Amino acid sequence: MTTRIDFGRSVLVVRSRGLTARVGVRSVVVCVILLVAALAVAVLALGTGDYAIPPDRVLRALVIGDHRFDRLVVWEWRFPRVVLALALGAALGVGGAILQSVTRNPLGSPDIVGFNTGAYTGALIVMLVLGGGSFQTSAGALIGGLGAALAIQLLAFRHNVTGFRLIIVGIGVSAMLASVNTWLVLRADLNAAMSAAAWGAGSLNGVSWSQVAPALVLLAGLVAVLIPVAKWLPILELGDDQARAFGIQVGRARLLLIVLSVALTATATAVAGPIAFIALAAPQLGRRLARTPSIALAPAAAMGALLLVACDWIAQRAFAPTTLPVGVVTVSIGGLYLAYLLVAEARRN
């Protein structure tokens, strides 16, 4: 198999046997800058804490590992948290990008539509009703997110799901599930309710290597499924008639993409709880930086990774030695972004 790369004025064209990909040069540059920034924040996060380690010793511990205690602190205590922050942030960014592209609406985010709320409902049922452990809670969150997506899909279905109807129905389902969540917490005993509330804030506290491998394997599988169908997204944004003209079965394509969006979001929720606003903000911020005509997955993933690892670092250090759930920081920052987005959309309309 041969591969050839051609540089145009602003487009990078990769040609291989049976495959041609066109990538904006600016998008590549933006992704590289965002990833470098995310890795720089990750190194800072690995070195900050009660036992501070300078960045050069962090890199030495990662590569050489000649200082045993540095290696213990970096690899065993802090590295799982940073790896999950990068991976889950990218997953949330891609999940939000898919849903915003399918609905053709910047508010079409899994946490706005209600998928996160459904995942929280599934986790609460396992934690407070069935008395399950951490693995069962993660499975319950995944099932809850997919169940909420199915309910929203069925309620919004009329020939095909339209973006605006999906968002409105999702907000309604989210409100009903939120009331169920409140009832589940209120009827539980105090200790269980406090644990459920802490999990519901979205936190990477206490994650370990035992959670990293399953999450990365599941995300890798979802990405493998997404890669061949990602080409449908810009075509679907042109409208259903145009998409059918290109030979796409619109209903099936949209359903598969929504399932992938929910699965990516629910995986992150299953590991760390419902982390709000990363899926909402990352695709739009990545799009504005890359100046792409439509939602692009790579900038959304890179921006999501940077946002989550940076917010988690802030959550650890802002009120040290008290560590906040990362969801508290993302809600604070995301609320400002949501207000800006609503004002911008109102002015545009």
Image (cartoon, rainbow, N blue to C red):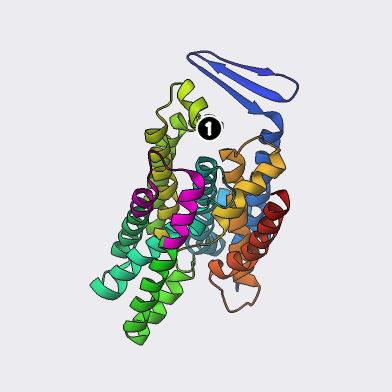
Disc 1 target residue: 239
In front: 42, or 64? 42
Residue drawn at x 37%, y 58% is 210
Residue 333 appears at what percent x and percent y?
65, 64
Residue 41 appears at what percent x and percent y?
65, 56
Which contiguous range is marked in magenta?
A: 149-172
Residue drawn at x 66%, y 58% is 342
Residue drawn at x 43%, y 71% is 199
In front: 34, or 55? 34
How crowded pointer 1 is (Cα within 10 Å; few <14, some 14-19, many 20+) is rated as few
Residue found at the very far left of the displayed protein: 130
Name the amino acid type tagged 1.
Answer: Gly
Residue found at the very far bottom of the displayed protein: 190
In front: 226, or 62? 226
Q: Secondary structure at mark 1?
A: loop
Reply yes or no: does residue 156 show up in magenta.
yes
In front: 153, or 303? 153
Q: Position of 302 compared to 180: left or right?
A: right
Reply yes or no: does residue 116 show up in magenta.
no
- Give above or below for 157 relative to 317: above
- Give above or below for 32 relative to 73: above
